[in-house]
Image (spheres, rainbow, N blue to C red):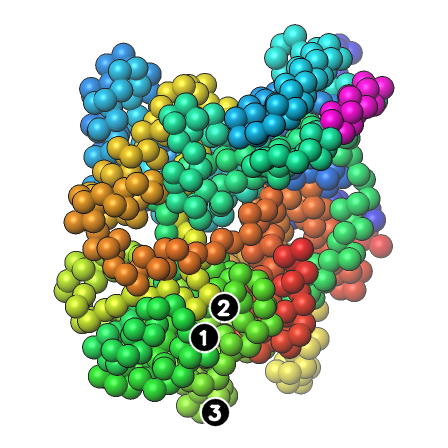
Amino acid sequence: MKRWLVLILVALMVFVVSCQSQDPAPEKPAEDPAAEAPAETPEEPAEEPAEEPAEEPAGDKTEIVFAVQEDSTKALEEVVKAFNEKSEKYSVKTTIMTNDSGQMYDQLLNSLSSKSGEYDVISMDVVWAGTFASAGYLEPMDELMMNNGWTPASFNKGSMDSGKYSGKHYALPYFPDLGFLYIRKDIVSEEDVAKLQSGDYSYADLLEMAKNYKGEMDTKFGYVYQSKQYEGLTVNINEFSNNWQDVAGGLEMMKAFMDEGVVPEDITNYTEGETLTAFIGGESVFARNWPYMNGVIQAGDQVVQSDQVAFAPLPNGGSVGGWLLGINANSEKMEGAQEFVAFLAGPEGQKINAVEGSYLPGFNELLEDSDVLAANKLVSDEGFKLALQKTIARPVVADYAKVSDAIQLNTHNFLTGGAELDAAAEAINEALK
Amino acid sequence: MNFRKRLDDSTPYLLILPVVIFLFVFAILPIAQSLRFAFYDYQLNDQRKNDLYSNPSYNLRLHDETIKYLHFYLDSEAVSVEKEETTQAIAALKEKLTSYDEEVKQLVPSPQMQPVVEVSEEVLEKIEAGKQELVKELNQLYALEDAFTLEEDIHAVAGGFDESVVQPNFTPTENFEEMLQDRRVRSTMRFTLIFTFISVFLELILGIALAMIMNQAIKGRGLIRTTSLIPWAIPTSVAAMMWGYLYDGSAGIVAHLFSSIGLLSKPTDLLLKSGSTLWAIVAADVWKTTPYMALLLLAGLQTIPDTLYESSSLDGANKWEQFRHITLPLLKPSIFVALLFRTLDAFRVFDLIYVLTGGGPGGSTESISIYAYKIMFGQTRFGYGSAIVLTMAIVVGIITFVYIKSLNVKLMGGDGS
């Protein structure tokens, strides 16, 4: 009797634990998105208003579904409206995804891996392109570019490199992004600002300046950047290590910033959000962040005003970020998807994006466009222009998530005192192979 | 009559049939499926491995794309090269490419236009031979000196032919061998076991104490019982956020308190220094689940008849002796159940740690569930992730077995020998 009970209990427990493993089976396409849907409900309302204007003039046009995160500016709405007015055969419906990029990645992966044509056009974080392309989820873009008379050189180089896998381009830029240095020019001397803006300085120089200027005008920190264990840490160590050329040196330099006390004590918990708060609140002399921070400063109402800020390239160049456009290889409306991508990534769509949303245009010609220059002061800034030329990409590999995870883990482990320098650097170099 | 009797006998089985079917469809099938993954090298980011392939196959979709791209790139090369000789060589290669494509289409017929078609080993060998010839020609072309611009890209694209060949990815032992090599499986497993042991032990001690207090016939007993259940009633992720605020290095009261009495050298260490984070997580977990433990034990306490305590006190037993010789032995089945539930729960810990530290700092608080999640969803290596989960299940089975043996519990009165 007892033996039986033991057996049954053991079986039961094994069963209970197995239940935990959410079944990733792509064989059940209908189930997975449905299961996730309820969790998204708080975000859902945003979807409704976005859909309506697109649907009404649609009439008998074929509908193209565009999966994208919510846009806090009016650019997305405008660009979709412009396309719907222009296109004779197609109309675009936007499906607003969650603003949590990690969750959006899971959601897209679920949909794409089930070979579903649910989304025709997807927007992707630059680092997803390698994985999606290697899995065969994306339709290559070279033919589309040729048909429109474009070459890869027509677009932002960093973005195009991020979407290139095994000799083919799988993505076009939606909006490029890059990291650069924000400077409080009311604190830093003109001479030093000039030096930084020339790009001819090292992290050691920056550390020295951060130490010197810290404390002036009530600043609490010399420099703020992103150092929490997340994707942003991969981005930052990419910059510190000069695109992985000197991993040990980069780690040591990051640690030096912490040991010298020029960064906040909980810098290893900093993301872009904390960086923004610290810099616009006037707490830090220097900051490393993406262009969006300038938008926030320009909007006013902050302790730091835009005439107090200057921009410069980072010592080893800034990482490329931003979003790409891809076409679902299983889309049933391939022609329409291509038409929309060509519109959105091409001069018309990019101009609307740049003018209405102050996004950096991914279509190079627009960098000279007078409307774009008027809408986005950053584009005409000399320091920023130089930063735009000095960009570095993160690795474009099929197993990016695994590589990046190993980089984050070992870097953070070293910074928080859990590992020795040599071991951490070795593990990172190993992961990058 | 015989039929009648048989019907009577089978009625109970008929009645439970819907439940059995339900269990089979919604529990056993998906589990069997995910167990099956554990024996395949199944990962999404490689077109040769992104499904369960038991037989060799050929990826026609990728093949077509590769052919198209080679033509496309060769055309652009033809524009940029300068010598007549090279132009001819390119044209010849394009013809070769077309005939190779036709050959493959004959070898791999796809009447229903499936992208991936099962083929025999012989066919794959023929395809491979044709491919090798093609690559040789390609190399010969690039051996010529001319103004080529796409050499690197063309070679990368030609790699698509290799990726079109799908070998069976049924590798019954590979995932488990990889696990043995994987340092992170060891470190996460060790962390999970340490966490489970410490937190369940503390919860048991505190749970017994709390249950005995709740069992006392004192004033406001209902209030005590209700309030003590609050932590357990809060959703774990909410509780984790709350503790996150308390532990926060710049504004958290707990972190501030600990550093001011000298437990920490600075407040940010609590969540950001390996070592102290384990205790932060244990404390949150103990706070959260002790009431649950106490509730299970309280139910056990209430089944102990008062008469036993009365007669023992007549025999002159003091409180401690009563606790040791009456309460503990009679509480054993309840302790067993409570320990079992909590151990299994703690072993699978995910949400608390995921929200509180995300596995950091530097992966020092990563539980095996979090690692399995990262492998499966972050890295899309479903095969390896399933192997980890299967191993977890086995470990849980072992824990259960050890509990049953060591506590020597009679679960259902009767024989129990």
Number of callouts in the render?
3
Q: Quadrant of the N terminus of chain B?
A: top right
Residue placed under numbered mark 3 in the picture: B262
Q: Which mark is residue A240?
A: 2
Q: Which mark is residue A203?
A: 1
Question: Which chain letter matches label 3?
Answer: B
Specify which label sits upstream in the sequence, 1 or 2. Answer: 1
- The residue stretch that appears in magenta: B122-137
Cβ atoms under marks 1 and 2 closer than 8 Å: yes
How dense is the environment of label 1, judged by Cα within 10 Å: few (below 14), some, or many (20 and up)? some
- Can residue B247 be seen here? The reply is no
Q: Amino acid at mark 2?
A: Phe
Callout in the foreground (3, 1) = 1
Residue ID at (62%, 49%): B375
- Indicate the position of residue A279 as horizontal and vertical percent values: 28, 70
Q: Amino acid at mark 1?
A: Tyr
For the residues beneath circles 1 and 2, the answer to whether they share a chain is yes
